[in-house]
């Protein structure tokens, strides 16, 4: 039989061309039939599901003809994106899925209880445990999740076009709780950290995100250690000294605020900023940077001789741009949105350099 025949019974938009086979024991009369020891098998090009020990009460004359439905099941999907065929929302492609649990319909809503889901891809592994109170609307979601095998280097390559770091970087793993519905996803108790300590990049992050799919609000904290100058140069363009710091990110519907306290070599610095946006467009940036004492050597600048193990900031014999060229290059790089920036440096020291009380204000 075609699985779409079940759509009006369970209020699910099951697509056509899914093969369905079912058998069970039935007992009762025409108005009330008890089903027991049932088995259901449904398959398509993307899905393979088997339910055993199925029980249900059929009331053919009622508006809801199937009630007290219980079906322990296992299900395999070629990819999470295949779920888009069965719900009213797009589901991203994350990898192959294996699920097990109990489909239950005590009265009107089809629920998933004791859900165990495993998603595997080349980029991460995700294990979810919990329940979905209403499968039709994807509401009443309560899932506890563990994620591992996140490829940090792959993430950096996706974010940075010219990222070319050949040394190994530790992966990431962690956990979080996902609740809410398809209209408002909430991520709580997020804990994400590097798999090993003292690597070239070590991250420990946590926090919460609400209304993930719409206008999100979030509060995230991260402690970051960057220990390899080669990695720092790939990320910043400077042969900087090892760095570490704490970052706080708060997101509101139309603004993102950041606060950082960090140390690069012997240089301590702090920064605060607000990015205003509408949709994908940035509408303005406010930024303040405070450095009590900037050691140019910590950034690989102002050196007569490069620090051992660090590449020189400028290639030997490279032609330097003229002041006019530098000015026009800077103008071309200015963004189209308003910027308010304040930089305060108490002292700058380096080879043949000693500057005190430098204040820079940029507005435009």
Image (cartoon, rainbow, N blue to C red):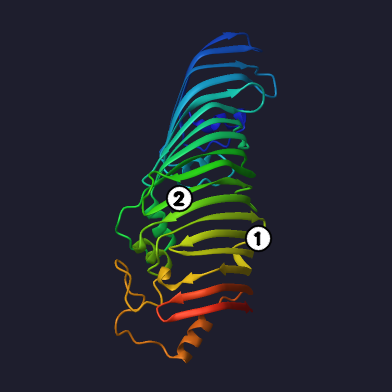
The dot on residue 255 is: 1
Instruction: Say which element carries label 1.
Output: strand
Q: Taking 128 as reference, is 287 above or below it?
A: below
Rendered-image quadrant of the C terminus: bottom right
Q: Taking 288 as reference, is 225 above or below it?
A: above
Could you tell me which residue is drawn at 31 percent across and 53 percent down?
A: 168
Q: Taking 3 as reference, is 51 above or below it?
A: above
Could you tell me which residue is drawn at 40 percent across and 64 percent down?
A: 241
What's the distance in space between the residues labelled 1 and 2, CA to CA? 24 Å
User: Quick one: 34 or 170, which is closer to the camera?
Assistant: 170
Instruction: Say which element carries label 2.
Output: strand
User: Quick one: 275 or 128, which is closer to the camera?
Assistant: 275
Task: Select label 1 or label 2 by which is in front.
Answer: 2
Could you tell me which residue is drawn at 42 percent across and 68 percent down?
A: 298
Q: Are marks 1 and 2 in contact (CB under 8 Å)?
A: no
Determine the image quadrant of residue 50: top left
Q: Earlier in the sequence, mark 1 or mark 2?
A: 2
Q: Tell me where residue 113 appears, x and y as whole percent.
A: 56, 25
Q: Tell me where residue 92 appears, x and y as whole percent.
A: 49, 47
Relative to 318, is 18 on the left or the right?
Answer: right
Relative to 166, is 100 on the left or the right?
Answer: right
The dot on residue 175 is: none
Q: Tell me where residue 285 appears, x and y as whole percent.
A: 62, 69
């Amino acid at each position: 039989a075609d699985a779409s025949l079940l759509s009006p019974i369970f209020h699910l938009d099951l697509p056509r061309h899914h093969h369905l086979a079912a058998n069970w024991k039935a007992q009762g009369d025409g108005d009330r039939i008890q089903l027991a020891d049932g088995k259901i098998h449904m398959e398509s090009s993307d899905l393979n599901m088997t339910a055993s020990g199925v029980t249900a009460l059929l009331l053919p004359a009622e508006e809801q003809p199937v009630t007290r439905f219980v079906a322990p099941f296992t299900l395999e999907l070629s990819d999470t994106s295949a779920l888009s065929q069965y719900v009213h929302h797009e589901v991203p492609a994350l990898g192959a899925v294996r699920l097990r649990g109990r489909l239950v319909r005590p009265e009107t809503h089809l629920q998933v209880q004791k859900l165990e889901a495993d998603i595997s891809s080349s980029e991460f592994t995700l294990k979810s445990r919990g329940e979905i109170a209403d499968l039709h609307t994807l509401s009443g979601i309560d899932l506890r999740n563990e994620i591992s095998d996140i490829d940090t280097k792959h993430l950096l390559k996706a974010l940075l076009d010219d990222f070319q770091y050949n040394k190994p970087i530790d992966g990431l793993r962690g956990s979080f709780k996902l609740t809410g519905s398809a209209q408002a996803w909430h991520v709580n108790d997020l804990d994400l950290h590097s798999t090993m300590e003292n690597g070239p990049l070590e991250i420990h992050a946590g926090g919460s995100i609400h209304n993930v799919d719409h206008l999100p609000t979030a509060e995230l904290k991260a402690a970051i250690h960057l220990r390899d100058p080669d990695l720092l140069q790939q990320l910043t363009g400077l042969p900087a000294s090892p760095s570490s710091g704490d970052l706080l990110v708060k997101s509101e519907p139309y603004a993102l605020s950041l606060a950082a306290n960090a140390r690069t070599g012997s240089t301590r610095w702090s920064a605060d900023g607000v990015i205003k946006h509408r949709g994908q467009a940035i509408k303005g940036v406010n930024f303040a940077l405070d450095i009590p004492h900037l050691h140019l050597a910590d950034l690989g600048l102002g050196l007569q001789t490069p620090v051992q193990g660090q590449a020189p900031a400028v290639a030997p014999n490279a032609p330097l741009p003229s002041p006019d060229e530098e000015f026009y290059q800077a103008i071309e790089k200015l963004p189209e949105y308003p910027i308010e920036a304040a930089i305060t440096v108490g002292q700058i020291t380096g080879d043949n350099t000693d500057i005190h009380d430098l204040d820079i204000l940029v507005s435009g």
